[in-house]
Image (cartoon, rainbow, N blue to C red):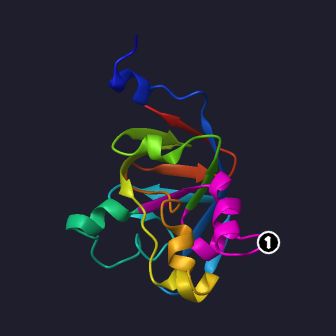
Amino acid sequence: MKTMRELQSTLPRPGRVERLLVREARRGRVLDLTEAEAVEGRGLRGDHIAERERPLSGAGAARQVTLIQAEHLPVVAALAGLDSLDAGVLRRNLVVSGVNVLALRERRFRVGEAVLEGTGPCHPCSRMEEELGEGGYNAVRGHGGITARVVKGGVIRVGDAVVPL
């Protein structure tokens, strides 16, 4: 019988980057890219987090890149009473499919040329009420994905594998 640690380290298959999104400003519009450079200790080049004059420190440094599961988008849409939901509304950087992103928390994983480390859950913000309507915050709760920091920089492209290390 496998230990809990062994069970948690085994994934059925790698994931895949479906979309790559950045925002030039905190409340700015979301840009859909085909590739971006992950910068060690900063985030994705072109995203407002990575482009800050001084890198985030403390708890903020754990939120350099955000990931959400593509499979959760229909769930969030249904909970919000919507027919469909564009991932850009949720303002996450990487939309990935085929892997449970919660299994990447507190571990390192490769995305394209970059190595990221899952740092915790990505909780929704009050902006979800603006984007999804009343109850939007709770529609995203538990389905918001994870936050990560960039351990090793490199290019990430749509279609790249997401592989735990």
Which residue does the image show at 61% across and 84% down from the upper left?
Answer: 131
Residue drawn at 29 percent across, 64 percent down: 61
The spot of residue 75 in percent (x, y) is 66, 60
Where residue 44 sits in the image (x, y, percent)?
A: 48, 63
Quarter of the view holding residue 42: bottom left
Q: Kindly state the secondary structure of the residue where label 1 is placed.
A: loop
Query: For the magenta stretch, what is the residue range?
Result: 65-93
Is residue 91 in view? no
Q: Nearer the viewer, residue 104 or 47?
A: 104
Q: Image height check: is 6 above or below 94?
A: above
Q: Quadrant of the C terminus?
A: top left
Residue behind mark 1:
83
**3 in relation to 145, above or below:** above
Asked if residue 118 shows in the view, the reply is yes
Task: Verify whether residue 26 appears in magenta.
Answer: no
Amino acid type, mark 1: Asp
Residue positioned 44% across, 42% down in the render: 104
- Name the quadrant containing residue 128: bottom right
